[in-house]
Amino acid sequence: MLVNRNIYLLFSILSIFICLLDIIEVNAQETPGLSVGNYTGIHALQSNPSAAIYSAYWLDFNIIGLEVFACNNGFYIPRSDFNVTDLLRRDYVFPTYGKYNRSFLTKGGTFMRNFFTQNRVLLPSAMVVDITRGLSVGLLLQSREAASGDCIPYDIANFGYYGLEHKAQHNIEYNDYNIYTAGLVWTELGVNIGRTLKRERFDLWAAGITLKYLWGHSGYFARIDNVRYVVLNDSTMDIRNLDAKAGFSLAIDYSNNDFPGPEGYTLGHGFSFDLGITFIKTNRELRRLFPGRLCEARFEPYVFRLGLSLLDIGSIRFSRNAQKHVFDGVSHFWEHARDFTYTTVDEAVNDISNRFYGNPTASLNDTSFTVGLPTAFSIQFDYHLNEKYYVHAMAIQAFPILGEEAVKRANVIYVMPRYETPAFEIGIPLSLYRYRIPRLGFWFRIYSFTLGTDNLGMFLRTGDFNNADIYLSLRIPLRKGKCLKSKGKLPCESF
C-alpha cells in the first residue's frame, strides 16, 4: 500500500489518521424519503422494525436502493471550484491546492475534527403484511459501509495535511487524549417480524424485531488514550508517550498489496438486531372485521403515530487476516522521519513496532478483534394535518455498545413537512446534524421510485463542499384495498 510520505510521517505512528484521510478522500445519515411515510414499505424498517404493520402496502418488493452519506468538519473544497454535476463529465479532474497538490483544503482553528460516513446498497428484499392476524414478515438483504472518527485534535489534522514542515507547530509539546476512529464494511441478511400487540377502538400498539446475520468484509478501530509529542523540525519527532490500541482486518495481502488477500472477501461474522414499538391514534374506530384476502385490507388514516426503536445492536468479530496492536506507555525519538516510505502494510506495522519496542512483532497483541455496529436510539413522531399533509419529526442518538471500539453514528434531529398521495409524494426535511449544524433537504416519490438528499445545499452550491448526501430506491409495491382480481360474487365484495 503506497502511502504519501508526508502524510505518513505522523500518521504511521497514529494509525487512526491514515484511516481518517482514506475515508475523507472517498467522499461517500438518515434517509427520510425512504424510511418515513405510509408508502415507504419495506424501507420503513430502517427506522423502526415495527413500522410495517401499519403500512399502506400489504406486499412490497425492493428491487434496488442506494444511500451515500459522508460529512466532516476538517477538510473541504471551495464552492466556487466544485459542482456535483461536474462528476458527470468524463474529463473532469478535481482541483488541487498547495505544494502537495491536495484535492481539498483544510480549515483553520483549534476545534476538534470529526467525520461520519455511511453507505448502503439495498438489495432485493420483500415484506408481506397480514392485517387479519396482525402480523408482518420481511426478508432484507443489503451491503453496508460505516465509519466514524471524533475528538481528533487540530494539531494532528494540520500535520496530516501540511506534513512535518508545518513550522507554526514546531517545538510545541502537544498532549492529546481520547481520540478514536472505527469502520466496517459488511453484508447483512435480516428477517423481520412485526406483531400487533393491542388493538382497541382508537388505539393500536405494534412491536417488531429484525434479526440479522452479518458477513464482515473489512474492519478497523483505533483508540488513542494519550499521545504526548513534540515536532522539532521537518524530519524529527519526539514522541514522549503513547497509549493506544488499534486493530485492522482488510481484504488485501499485507505483504504485497494483492486484492483480494489470501483469506478472501469475508473476514469476520456477527449478529445484530433492531427492536421497535409503535403507537397509533386514529380519529375513527378501527375495524374489528377483516377481509379474507390480504389485498382486501384497507389502510386507515391516523391522527398521529409515535415510534421508539433501537437500531443496529450488535457487532462483527474479525478473526481472519486480523491484527490487534497495543502500545502501552511507549516512547520514541524519531530522527530522519522523511528518509523512507512504506510500500506494504507489513513494512509499516513491523517498523513501528520495532521503533517502540525494539521488536517487529512485539506490538501484536491478538489476531482477532470485535468492532461494534453504529448502534442508535431513535424516536419518530408523525402527525396527520389533513387528508394529504403530514409533519414528521425524528431524533437519532448514538448508543455505541462497545465504547470506543465501535462505529459511532452521528446524532441528528429533524422536522419535515410532506405532501403524500399514492402516486406522488414530496418532503422537505430540516435537520440539525450533530444537533447543531442546520441542513435543508428535499426528496420526492413518483409511485415506487424515490430520489432525495438531506443536504440540498450540496446541489445549490450554497456552501463549501465538505459532505455528500444522496439516496434513491426502486420498488414494486401492492397497495392495501387493491386486488388484482376479485373472487367476490357481488360488486360490494370487491374492494
Image (cartoon, helix red, strand yellow):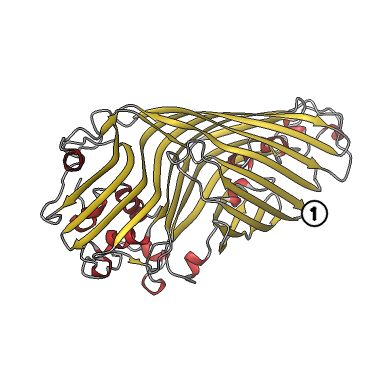
Q: Residue at x 36, y 31 (%)?
A: 369
Q: Nearer the viewer, residue 173 or 320?
A: 173
Can you tell which quarter of the image residue 195 is in? Answer: top right
Q: In this rendering, does residue 298 appear at all?
A: yes
Left or right, residue 336 beside residue 35? left
Image x and y of residue 337, in percent: 15, 54
What is the x, y in percent for residue 90? 30, 61
The quarter of the displayed image where residue 438 is located: bottom right
Q: Is residue 40 above or below residue 92?
A: above
Q: Going 25% across and 70% down the picture, which residue do you hit? A: 98
Figure quadrant of residue 440: bottom right
> Which residue: 63% across, 60% down?
428
Inspect the image, locate mark 1, and give the three-letter code of the amino acid beneath it: Glu
Measured from the top left, where is residue 256 in percent x and y? 16, 38
Q: Which residue lies furthest to the bottom in this view?
A: 80
Closer-to-camera residue (367/208) = 367
- Whether residue 346 is visible, yes or no, is no
Quarter in which the C terminus is drawn: top right
Q: In this view, does 443 lie above or below 284?
A: below
- Count of numbered circles in the view: 1
Q: What element carries label 1?
A: loop
Q: Residues within 10 Å of mark 1 (few under 14, many from 20)?
A: few
Image position, residue 34 (x, y; %): 59, 48
In which quadrant of the rendered image does the N terminus lie?
A: top left
Q: Mark 1 points at which residue?
A: 387
98 left or right of 456 in image? left
Could you tell whether 58 is left or right of 353 in the image?
right
